[in-house]
Image: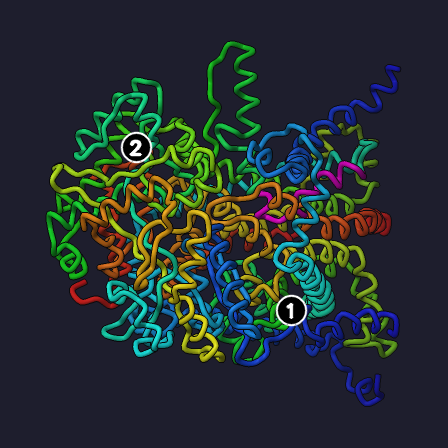
């Protein structure tokens, strides 16, 4: 028994504390989403009188001609396409920056820093989008998301690529494999662990993005999921139960992404350390 | 690959690979930013503009809440990034160590990263409500048991710096998962042999930490510090969602001051504010970035 | 390559197809209408659309919601600037309307036949010079003090006609263990009513205040009468007359407190009435209204918030259909529909011959008495284009005791400088 305790004491401490700190707010979301409007107003952890989660979900999905469903579809397309583009074009560029010192690379470092630091300018961006006939289009918003996520992705990719031995490139180059083919056949597969990281963080960021769709893809036809929270938060009376049901619903896709890729993150990391 | 290219001894790192992201970045980020520099020197109603030189900047620095804003921005940035480094590394060590429930707890720790910022802001605003929130209700109940009469602190409404720190706490709660993941990646890249070698030499846990872990995890620390510091200095969404810069102006940061100008329709002034924020962050983060880069080159 | 190629191609193909959208508009008989998401406004808008579509088969109006408050202001301006505004939109009149650059962005309505239905008293707040750009939406609202009748009855209090009487009442209320004045600083806009509703008293003492204020000749800090509004807040805070949780009370919670008698007074405007009707229908009749009192009983009247306007952007592609809808909104039928929305009518309409329903909540009947006596004045924001963005936050600071009334007034005077310069006004 003592041995059991000695082995597992950290677990006994860590699990409840971890749950309390990190999961408690989620429990509040879940409980509030299951209550009726008046109970939700109480803001407490008490169990709802009647478990109304399913009813609330139906109400939420039916609001305004199913705007929430449209929003989910739009957000999903937005996320998948943006993230795919980011993974491809950013790793390509980071590869060059990591391997090829020179003026362009120095310039790129400054641009990366700028990309992280400079807050985007809303109206000039709209002006650019309009010139290109991309304003209020999903395509336009996708390109925006790629542009805004580029700095972070390139930064991470660059760091990781630096740890891939240059000999691999040189060996491939001697076989005539250069440029795009080099990236595609040799480097990109080696980037799998960090690809996973980028996919997870970027898809969550894009899916949860609120301000960019608000400005660049306005209109309830084009709704994305964060904007649907508005429908339950009127100026005077917030229906908290429906609001939290919506929050619950829009947390599910990122959760699914995480569950799918969670194992890969772990195995990717340990694979790296075995290589040493 | 064509034979013609082969014979040229071409650099295998073709700049063509940079082109796609380069173009996207230039069009959708660089150009609007440059355009906005211009507009920061105008009085801009979105419908027409009038060149006013540096008047916006002068007006900006007359802003009553500005001193508070600069101070708060710095505090917020330092506190959130500092805590993310400490807790991120601590959690990463815990979650790569002896723990059996590793997989489960990793998900638990990372989970807040997934919830939308607005959702988090709402949830914690409710938890922190001074009268109806669960946190203060617990404090009041606890107080009753030990005979201490209290209503609990006004987490988001006290007329001092408490609101700012409350939001910072939520920011760390939400973001520490990413720091932990970055640190876990960093820890995983440290070869086990180093630890074993030190153990053979009689080194204990603290020596291992100080002499092996800490130095070798520096790239991860650099990434965490820079990313979270920049994010903290620029932070807006969470602060705005939870306090709106209030009570009054007490939790205002530069980003929220700028947003208020923007909201009020002073587009030139708001753009000038963003320019100022940009230089402020560069001035502070620049040295930090340079410091870490130097060390990396040394290593 | 093939496998990955397909994986890449599929989402791209989806993108080059359309986004999943509602069917595109047919020309000319389908229009869109942008309204803020306040519950009462939504209800009224939906009712109007339903009636309009019934009376005009083949015509479709799609309602689009936007946030209220300053986020809404921003969104409206951005949409107009980028030519992406809906065919019809409802927005504030007065100084906020002026900030939209109407001559450039809106469709003129001066000579439209339906303008005959609109009372000329409405024209100034939706005009630039002689050109009119909007029709009224809903009724006027009136600012003053909402009070709980049951508390007054229990403590045998009389409606105060001077500030001194008001504060004396508060003292008795506090002694009885009830919160004299409710404040709800979680929603900062509610902090402004003591100052803004006092404008009736200011313009009674200084009839030229609006013009002088616009010309940078009057200041809140310097004008003793104007400063009073700020001092009222300071005074109540010092005497501890606010509800204990005032820093975190929401607007909805404040209305509940008022209706249920947990607080006696709430400085607010009558747009709150439909809200109370929705939240506490059983206690709606416990709520009454009186004008914010000044120093003299002889000067006692209410400050009026002119209704919002409904406008058409110049860039619309459906001008004819839009005008048809907007015109219909000035008709007697439309007024009937609006009257049918519970509690939506909070004062007089600015439409000729419009009747207010007979069964009005008691608070609104109290309001109508002032109109009958002609004891009304429009709020400052309708007679001067200047309103600084930070007033509400500055007043919260006064209410929390962070700053004094004098300093706050000076801060607000400095705040409006930005607005004045932005509008390019002379003398600033």
Q: Nearer the viewer, mark 1 or mark 2?
A: 1
User: Could you tell me which secondary element the residue under label 2 belongs to?
Assistant: loop
SS state under label 1: loop
- Which chain does tag 1 point to? C
Up/down of B18 relative to B202, above or below: below
Mark 1 touches mark 2? (CB < 8 Å):
no
Whether residue C167 is visible, yes or no, is yes
Q: Nearer the viewer, residue C188 or C124?
A: C124
Marks 1, 2 in one chain: yes
Residue B111 among magenta residues? yes
Residue C341's place in the image compared with B51, above or below, is above
Residue plotted at (64% across, 35% down): A28
Q: Which chain is disc 2 placed on?
A: C
Measuring 11% from the left and 40% from the top, which residue is drawn there? C298
Position of residue A225 in the picture relative to residue B204 (left or right): left
Whether C61 is drawn above or below C221: the answer is below
Residue ID for mark 2? C401
Q: Relative to residue C424, is residue C223 depicted above or below? A: above
Residue C158 drawn in magenta: no
Q: How many marks?
A: 2
Quarter of the rendering occupied by the C terminus of chain C:
bottom left
Label 2: few (<14), some or many (≥20) within 10 Å?
A: some
**Residue stretch rendered in magenta on the structure:** B103-120
List x then y, in percent, for residue B242: 50, 42
Sooner in the amino-acid sequence: mark 1 or mark 2: 1
Find disc 1 in the rendering and name its residue.
C22
Quadrant housing residue A31: top right
């Amino acid at each position: 028994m003592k041995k059991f305790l000695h082995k597992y004491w950290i677990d006994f401490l860590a699990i409840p504390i971890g749950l309390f700190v990190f999961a408690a707010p989620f429990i509040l979301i879940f409980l509030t989403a299951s209550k009726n409007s008046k109970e939700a107003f109480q803001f407490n952890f008490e169990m709802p009188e009647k478990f109304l989660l399913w009813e609330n979900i139906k109400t939420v999905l039916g609001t305004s001609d199913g705007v929430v469903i449209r929003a989910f579809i739009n957000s999903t397309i937005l996320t998948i396409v943006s993230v795919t583009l980011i993974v491809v074009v950013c790793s390509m560029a980071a590869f060059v920056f990591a391997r090829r010192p020179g003026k362009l690379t120095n310039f790129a470092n400054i641009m990366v820093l700028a990309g992280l630091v400079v807050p985007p300018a809303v109206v000039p961006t709209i002006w650019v989008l309009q010139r290109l006939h991309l304003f209020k289009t999903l395509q336009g918003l996708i390109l925006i998301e790629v542009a805004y996520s580029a700095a972070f992705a390139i930064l991470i990719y660059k760091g990781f690529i630096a740890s891939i031995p240059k000999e691999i490139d040189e060996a491939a180059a001697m076989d005539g494999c250069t440029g795009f083919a080099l990236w595609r056949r040799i480097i990109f597969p080696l980037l799998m662990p960090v690809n996973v990281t980028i996919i997870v963080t970027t898809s969550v960021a894009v899916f949860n993005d609120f301000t960019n769709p608000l400005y660049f893809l306005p209109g309830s036809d084009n709704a994305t999921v964060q904007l649907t929270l508005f429908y339950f938060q009127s100026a005077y009376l917030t229906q908290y139960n429906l609001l939290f049901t919506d929050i619950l619903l829009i947390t599910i896709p990122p959760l699914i992404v995480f569950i799918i890729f969670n194992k890969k993150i772990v195995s990717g990391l340990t694979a790296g350390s075995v290589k040493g | 690959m064509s034979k013609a290219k082969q014979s040229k001894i071409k650099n295998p790192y073709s700049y063509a690979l940079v082109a796609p992201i380069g173009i996207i970045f230039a069009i959708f980020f660089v150009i609007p930013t440059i355009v906005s520099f211009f507009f920061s020197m105008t009085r801009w109603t979105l419908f027409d503009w009038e060149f006013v030189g540096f008047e916006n900047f002068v007006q900006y620095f007359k802003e009553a809440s500005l001193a508070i804003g600069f101070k708060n921005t710095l505090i917020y940035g330092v506190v959130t990034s500092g805590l993310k480094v400490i807790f991120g590394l601590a959690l990463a060590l815990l979650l790569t160590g002896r723990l059996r429930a590793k997989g489960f707890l990793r998900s638990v720790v990372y989970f807040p990263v997934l919830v939308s910022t607005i959702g988090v802001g709402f949830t914690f605003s409710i938890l922190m409500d001074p009268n109806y929130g669960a946190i203060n209700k617990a404090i009041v109940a606890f107080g009753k048991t030990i005979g201490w009469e209290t209503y609990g602190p006004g987490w988001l409404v006290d007329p001092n710096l408490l609101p700012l720190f409350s939001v910072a706490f939520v920011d760390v709660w939400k973001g520490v998962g990413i720091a932990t993941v970055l640190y876990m990646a960093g820890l995983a890249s440290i070869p086990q042999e180093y630890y074993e070698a030190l153990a053979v030499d009689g080194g204990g846990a603290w020596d291992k930490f100080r002499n092996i872990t800490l130095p070798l995890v520096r790239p991860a620390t650099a990434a965490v510090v820079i990313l979270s510091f920049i994010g903290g200095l620029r932070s807006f969404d969470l602060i705005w969602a939870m306090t709106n810069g209030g009570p009054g102006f007490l939790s205002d940061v530069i980003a929220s001051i700028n947003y208020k100008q923007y909201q009020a329709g002073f587009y030139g002034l708001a753009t000038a504010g963003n320019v100022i924020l940009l230089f402020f962050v560069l001035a502070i983060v620049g040295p930090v970035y340079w410091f870490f880069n130097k060390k990396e080159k040394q290593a | 390559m093939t496998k990955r190629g397909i994986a890449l191609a599929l989402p791209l193909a989806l993108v080059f197809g359309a986004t999943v959208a509602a069917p595109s508009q047919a020309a000319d008989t389908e229009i869109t209408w942008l309204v803020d998401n306040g519950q009462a406004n939504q209800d009224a808008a939906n009712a109007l659309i339903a009636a309009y579509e019934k009376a005009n088969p083949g015509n479709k109006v799609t309602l689009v919601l936007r946030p209220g408050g300053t986020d809404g202001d921003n969104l409206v301006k951005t949409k107009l600037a980028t030519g992406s505004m809906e065919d019809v939109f409802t927005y504030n009149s007065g100084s906020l309307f002026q900030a939209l650059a109407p001559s450039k962005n809106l469709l003129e309505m001066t000579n439209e036949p339906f303008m005959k239905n609109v009372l000329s008293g409405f024209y100034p707040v939706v005009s630039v010079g002689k050109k009119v750009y909007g029709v009224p939406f809903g009724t006027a609202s009136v600012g003053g003090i909402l009070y709980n009748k049951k508390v007054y009855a229990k403590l045998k209090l009389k409606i105060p006609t001077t500030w001194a009487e008001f504060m004396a009442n508060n003292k008795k209320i506090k002694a009885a263990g009830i919160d004299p004045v409710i404040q709800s600083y979680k929603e900062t806009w509610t902090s402004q009513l003591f100052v803004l509703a006092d404008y009736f008293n200011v313009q009674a003492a200084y009839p030229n205040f609006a013009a002088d204020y616009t010309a940078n000749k009057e200041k809140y800090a310097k004008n003793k009468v104007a400063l009073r509004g700020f001092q009222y807040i300071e005074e109540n805070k010092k005497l501890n007359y606010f509800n204990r949780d005032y820093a975190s009370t929401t607007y909805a919670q404040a209305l509940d407190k008022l209706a249920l008698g947990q607080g006696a007074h709430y400085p607010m405007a009558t747009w709150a009435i439909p809200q109370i009707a929705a939240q506490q229908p059983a206690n709606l009749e416990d709520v009454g209204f009186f004008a914010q009192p000044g120093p003299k009983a002889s000067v006692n009247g209410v400050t009026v918030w002119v209704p919002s306007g409904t406008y058409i952007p110049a860039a619309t592609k459906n001008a004819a259909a839009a005008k048809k809808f907007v015109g219909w909104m000035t008709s007697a039928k439309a007024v009937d529909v609006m009257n049918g929305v519970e509690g939506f009518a909070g004062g007089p309409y600015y439409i000729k011959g419009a009747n207010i329903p007979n069964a009005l909540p008691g608070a609104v009947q109290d309001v109508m008495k002032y109109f009958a006596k002609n004891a009304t004045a429009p709020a400052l924001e309708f007679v001067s284009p200047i309103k600084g963005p930070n007033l509400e936050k500055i007043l919260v600071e006064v209410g929390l005791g962070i700053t004094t009334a004098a300093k706050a007034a000076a801060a607000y005077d400095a705040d409006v400088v930005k607005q004045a310069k932005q509008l390019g006004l002379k003398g600033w």
